[in-house]
Image: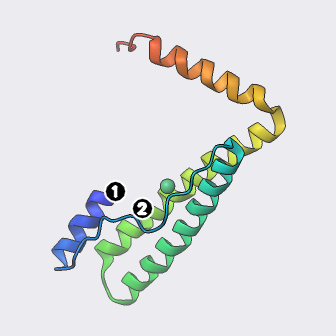
Amino acid sequence: MLKKLAERILFLKGDVDMSPSGKVQKLTNVKDMLSLARKMEEESAKEYNIWANECAANADAISKQLFEGLVADEERHFDQYDTELENITQFGPSYLALQSIERSKNISSPPQEG
Ligand SMILES: [Fe+2]
């Protein structure tokens, strides 16, 4: 999606800045990571909604659709992090251990044919 956004910016004769928008935070606690990720997704969705409305106000339907797609992505990511955070809170550290075991199984399993 970000590639499409960059292509749109270039199409509109703008400049694409790929530098990080903020400082990287070093977090080692999973709950802290998920809380921050959830907050960032929520803020991004709000920002993209504002930009979608700005595009609509300027009769730019294509850019509006791109931002609306980003809002949907960010809301889905928010929900994913929110669910993981709830699961960790409810089941404790054993939830993370189970997730790790499942991931290892999936990585070591041969791909399914069909
Ligand atoms: Fe996201």
Indicate the position of residue 84 as horizontal and vertical percent values.
68, 41
Residue corresponding to mark 2: 69
Rendered residue at 56%/57% (across/down): 25
Looking at this view, name the residue that lies furthest to the bottom: 57
Q: Amino acid type of disc 2?
A: Gly
Rendered residue at 29%/72% (across/down): 62
Using a 10 Å C-alpha cutoff, classify the residue at mark 2 as few (fewer than 14 neighbours), some (14 to 19) or many (20 or more).
some
Total labels drawn? 2
Residue corresponding to mark 1: 1
Q: Secondary structure at mark 1?
A: loop
Indicate the position of residue 73 as horizontal and vertical percent values.
48, 55
| Apparent side of residue 90 relative to residue 44 in the rendered image (left or right) | right
Indicate the position of residue 60 as horizontal and vertical percent values.
30, 81
Indicate the position of residue 49 as horizontal and vertical percent values.
50, 74
Q: Nearer the viewer, residue 105 or 111?
A: 105
Of the 4 image quadrants, the one containing the C terminus is: top left
| Apparent side of residue 73 relative to residue 57 in the rendered image (left or right) | right
| Apparent side of residue 94 relative to residue 45 in the rendered image (left or right) | right
Rendered residue at 69%/43% (across/down): 29
Cβ atoms under marks 1 and 2 closer than 8 Å? yes
Q: Amino acid type of disc 1?
A: Met
Q: Nearer the viewer, residue 77 or 63?
A: 77
Question: Toward which corner of the image does residue 46 lie, by quadrant?
Answer: bottom right
| Apparent side of residue 7 relative to residue 81 in the rendered image (left or right) | left
